[in-house]
Image: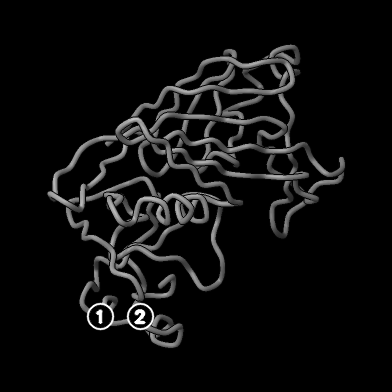
Amino acid sequence: MTATYKGFYKDSLGACPIEIENDFSTLTTTIEGVSFIGSEFDDLTVDDKLKYTARQLARFTFLKTPIYQTDRFVETLCNCSIEAVIPQVIIDKVNNTEFYADLTFKNSLGKPRSEKPGTGTEHESVTLSLTIAGATYTGTSGDVEGAFDGIFKQINDKYHLKNCYGCMYSDYSVYGQSTFGSMLCFRNQKEVYSKVRTKAEYLKLDPPEGYVQEIYCCDQYAVRKLGVGYRG
């Protein structure tokens, strides 16, 4: 299963249209003839730097992150913003009908704090904007969970989000999460997970089925109930 989103890459030199392919594990895109790949919007790396000239790569800024227990590092795209329009299924709570709405996903990344690897970027933010029936609901945070939380608070009396963020069986690790795509899927133990109310109970669960992106949705989706699991 692969989806393609239209969007924009923006930096200090301007903006250019891009397309982002998502197989719901890996993101790929081409920017000004240079191909990038990553598991999320803030860890995109050039597919093979040897394929491109210094002039082609000169536009881009890269954050150097050390690879654990090695003297090497990964270079990820930063000092830019990446925006994509992602269709999402919405459930109307009044009549239980489903329809598509456009979710605008924007990940803004600052420049590296210093030239030293591992120092991170000066800032990062995720802004999600969901347009339904002419109204736009927006959430901004340091990660997708927080941005979706902002939207959820605005639409909860009218709509459900039919995706992994809004699913009964998706949650996050107690040990932390990445900006995007690190939700844990507990559909392999639905009944047990649905009874979890505390962190202690959550930690006793069997391993999840795997990781999922917040914007994904499978055929076992169920509307999330408040107070369940680690994220409540």
Q: How many marks?
A: 2
In the image, what residue occupies the spot 52% across and 55% down? Answer: 146
Q: Which three-letter amino acid code belongs to the residue tagged 1?
A: Val
Q: Tag 1: Cα neighbours inside 10 Å, few (<14), some, or many (≥20)?
A: some
Residue that numbered label 2 is attached to:
205
Question: Is 154 placed left or right of 72 in the picture?
Answer: left
Q: Tag 2: Cα neighbours inside 10 Å, few (<14), some, or many (≥20)?
A: few
**On screen, residue 12 above or below 86:** above
Give the structural element (helix, strand or loop) at label 1. Answer: helix
Residue 168 image offset from top left, x and y in percent: 28, 65
Q: As rendered, which of 128 and 176 lies closer to the eye? A: 128
Question: Is 5 placed left or right of 192 in the picture?
Answer: right
Are circles 1 and 2 on residues that touch, CB within 8 Å?
Answer: yes
Residue that numbered label 1 is attached to:
192
Distance CA(mark 1)–CA(mark 2): 8 Å
Question: Is 52 placed left or right of 85 in the picture?
Answer: right
Give the structural element (helix, strand or loop) at label 2. Answer: loop
In the image, what residue occupies the spot 43% across and 82% down? Answer: 203
